[in-house]
Image: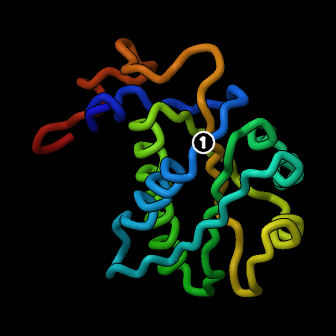
């Protein structure tokens, strides 16, 4: 898929087929996240990949809106440092967002759907994923082949009109 097609095809997918994702495809998706830009090339993330059905089912319990994780072929946990400084926390959120969209677009390019989830239960997340103190599970990105309809460029996206969003030179 071309980049523009991947951008237009990407949507939040929360229902997946039972098809596994091949290891080279997972590695390519993770490499896209690893290569994401970050402030001052900080690269504040670590990725924990979960593919076992029992582990995915447990991982889905970290937030009430993460039920789709249990049905995914794989889920990537984005782990980041706990920071005291508010400015650095804001930069961290931006950088994690860049890694997230890089991962999601790389997945879409391969015809793999993705759906993000927040994390509420950090204690359970740490117990399940084993990340060290001083770190937290920021987000989950569930991956799998879409059930129902494959990814394809969306012709009429549910978005505000271009003219309402884009302001040239001033508002």
What's the residue at 84%, 44% (across, down)?
64
Q: Residues within 10 Å of mark 1 (few under 14, many from 20)?
A: some
Image point (55%, 79%), residue name: 86
The image shows residue 114 at horizontal and vertical percentages of 57, 39
Task: From the viewer's side, name the closer residue of 16 and 80.
Answer: 16
x%, y% of residue 67?
Answer: 81, 39
Q: Quadrant of residue 154?
A: top left
Count all numbered tags in the image, as a single digit.
1
Q: Is residue 19 above or below residue 42?
A: above
Q: Which corner quadrant holds the C terminus? A: top left
Q: Is residue 88 left or right of residue 154?
A: right
Quarter of image, res 123: bottom right
Q: Colour mode?
A: rainbow
- List x then y, in percent, for residue 81: 62, 81
| Residue at left offset 30%, top offset 28% | 5
Q: Is residue 78 above or below residue 58?
A: below
Secondary structure beneath dot 1 equals loop
Q: Residue furthest left?
A: 169
Residue that carries the numbered disc 1 in the rendered image? 21
Name the spot of residue 112 as percent of width and height, x first.
Answer: 52, 35
Q: Is residue 72 above or below residue 31?
A: above
x 76%, y 86%: residue: 133
Q: Is residue 33 left or right of residue 146?
A: left
Residue 4, above or below 50:
above
* Left or right: 102 as drawn, with respect to 27: left
Residue 50 lies in what quarter of the image? Answer: bottom right
Q: Is residue 56 left or right of residue 155?
A: right
Quadrant containing the N terminus is: top left
């Amino acid at each position: 898929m071309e980049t523009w097609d991947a951008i237009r095809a990407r949507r939040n997918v929360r229902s997946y087929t039972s098809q596994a994702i091949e290891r080279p495809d997972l590695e390519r998706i993770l490499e896209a996240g690893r290569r994401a830009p970050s402030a001052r090339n900080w690269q504040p993330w670590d990725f924990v990949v979960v593919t076992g059905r029992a582990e995915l089912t447990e991982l889905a319990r970290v937030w009430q809106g993460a039920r789709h994780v249990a049905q995914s072929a794989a889920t990537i946990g984005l782990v980041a440092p706990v920071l005291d400084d508010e400015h650095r926390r804001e930069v961290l959120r931006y950088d994690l967002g860049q890694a997230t969209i890089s991962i999601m677009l790389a997945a879409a390019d391969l015809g793999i759907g993705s759906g993000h989830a927040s994390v509420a239960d950090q204690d359970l997340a740490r117990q399940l994923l084993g990340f060290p103190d001083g770190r937290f599970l920021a987000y989950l990105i569930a991956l799998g082949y879409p059930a129902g309809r494959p990814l394809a460029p969306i012709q009429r996206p549910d978005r505000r009109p271009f003219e309402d969003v884009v302001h040239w030179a001033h508002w």
